[in-house]
Amino acid sequence: MQSLSKAELLALLAAARAQRERDWLMILVAYWHGLRASEVTSLVLDNLHDGFLTVQRLKGSMKTTQPLVEHPEPLLNEKPALFEYTRGMHGIQRIFPISRVQFWRLLRRYGLTAGLPEHKAHPHVLKATIAMHSIGTAGIENTRQWLGHRSISSTGEYLRVTDEEAAKAVTGALGALNY
């Protein structure tokens, strides 16, 4: 499954933020929490409580409650930006009142503006990216819980690599053995 490198993610976020704060924040929330397009566009203010985001995942996944992320990189600093953005909203008011199709179109546009290959310019790449960025350090079981997967096999789908990626990793590892 294709995911974004850190540089690609930052380029995508910068392209969105340059055009519209809402779009940047929507992409950022979808990335940090591994949300589907329909999940992020359905968020309401009541999903936010005391610095946490609670989401009932779709497609048979679990309900998750996760802390909003504070990060030293301004493009990745979700918590203060989301608090500022939602100031004045109430109750069941949608945080990002657009359709999942419109979110898809926006991500496609910002992705291409950021120089992403076309096959990476879609919303699901955000979920794949947080999965790939976290599996190696947090472990597959913690990543499974974070993404709201009931089955470890759902999370395991993000571990698939291409022949090219495998060749690069294995030859790099073998080169480091100093035969």
Image (cartoon, rainbow, N blue to C red):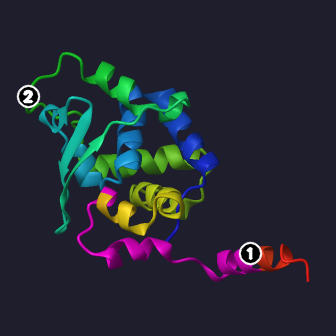
State the mark number for residue 100: none
Q: Is residue 175 positioned above or below 91 on the image?
A: below
Residue located 18% across and 61% down the image: 62
The image shows residue 113 at horizontal and vertical percentages of 57, 43
Label 2 packing within 10 angstroms: few (<14), some (14-19), many (20+): few
Q: Secondary structure at mark 2?
A: loop
**In magenta stretch: residue 71:** no
Q: Residues at badges 1 and 2 in contact (C-beta under 8 Å)? A: no
How far apart marks 1 and 2 lie (CA) works out to 50 Å
Residue at the outermost right position: 179
Residue located 59% across and 41% down the image: 11
| Main SS, magenta residues | helix
Give amino acid for label 1. Answer: Lys
**Residue 130 occupies quadrant:** bottom left
State the mark number for residue 91: 2
Read off the magenta span: 146-170
* Nearer to me, 22 or 151: 151
Residue at the outermost left position: 91
Q: Is residue 1 positioned above or below 39 on the image?
A: below
State the mark number for residue 168: 1
In this rendering, would 5 be left or right of 172?
left
The image shows residue 100 at horizontal and vertical percentages of 26, 51
Give amino acid for label 2. Answer: Gly
